[in-house]
Image (cartoon, helix red, strand yellow):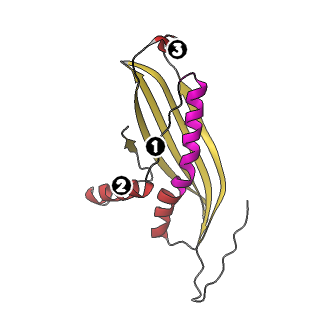
Amino acid sequence: MAEIQQTQGTTGEATPQFSIQRIYLKDLSLELPHAPQIFLESAAPTVEIQLDIRNEILAEGVHETAVRVTVTARMGDKVAFLVEATQAGIFTAQGIASEQMDAVANILCPNIIYPYARSNIADAVQRSGFPPVHLAEINFEALYQQRLAEQSAANGESGSSSGIYVPN
């Protein structure tokens, strides 16, 4: 793992540093429970998307952020396909205040990881015989602010998972 050296600013405080150690596909699952009959269906599928962000501290100044995306396509009452991908990254963050680190882990890191998840899901769906699913871009800052508002409304209860449902 690469080492990060902290530099001292003119005020004597450590200069904040952030780096990507690794981006990787942690898990990928694809199910076609009604194949091959589902390919004979002519109904247009409805698609449901769920998104979840998880953060884990691995070592001092090193953490993992994982974005799990679940896409379920239904044709009538049958599931055409279900794909779940967990794209993750290991990040090094030094000299970042703890109150800012939560925003870094839930906004900046998912913004880096999510395009990889979108690509992997589109590829997996296309390789299964269906047209690729092109997931929309997500404003992780707005989702983070929404989660903070929900947490403050619930008397300050907090968690490490966002559990976000993304309507299509």
Residue 129 counted in the magenta span: yes
Residue closest to the eye, 132 or 15: 132
Residue 35's disc number = 3
User: According to the image, label 1 marks what residue?
Assistant: 136
- Location of residue 41 by image quarter: top left
Q: CA distance from mark 2 to mark 3?
A: 38 Å
x%, y% of residue 12? 59, 87
Highlighted range, magenta:
109-130
Amino acid at the residue labelled 3: Ala
Determine the CA span between mark 1 and mark 3. Answer: 27 Å
Left or right, 57 with respect to 53, comes to right
Q: For the residue carrying disc 3, how many other residues have a C-alpha within 10 Å: few (<14), some (14-19), or many (20+)?
A: few
- Does label 2 or label 3 sit earlier along the sequence? 3
Q: Quadrant of the N terminus?
A: bottom right
- Residue 149, above or below 30: below
What is the crowding at mark 1: few (fewer than 14 residues within 10 Å), some, or many (at least 20)?
few
| Residue at 52% over, 46% down | 67
What's the amino acid at mark 2? Answer: Arg
How far from the left and from the top, in percent, is residue 88?
59, 48
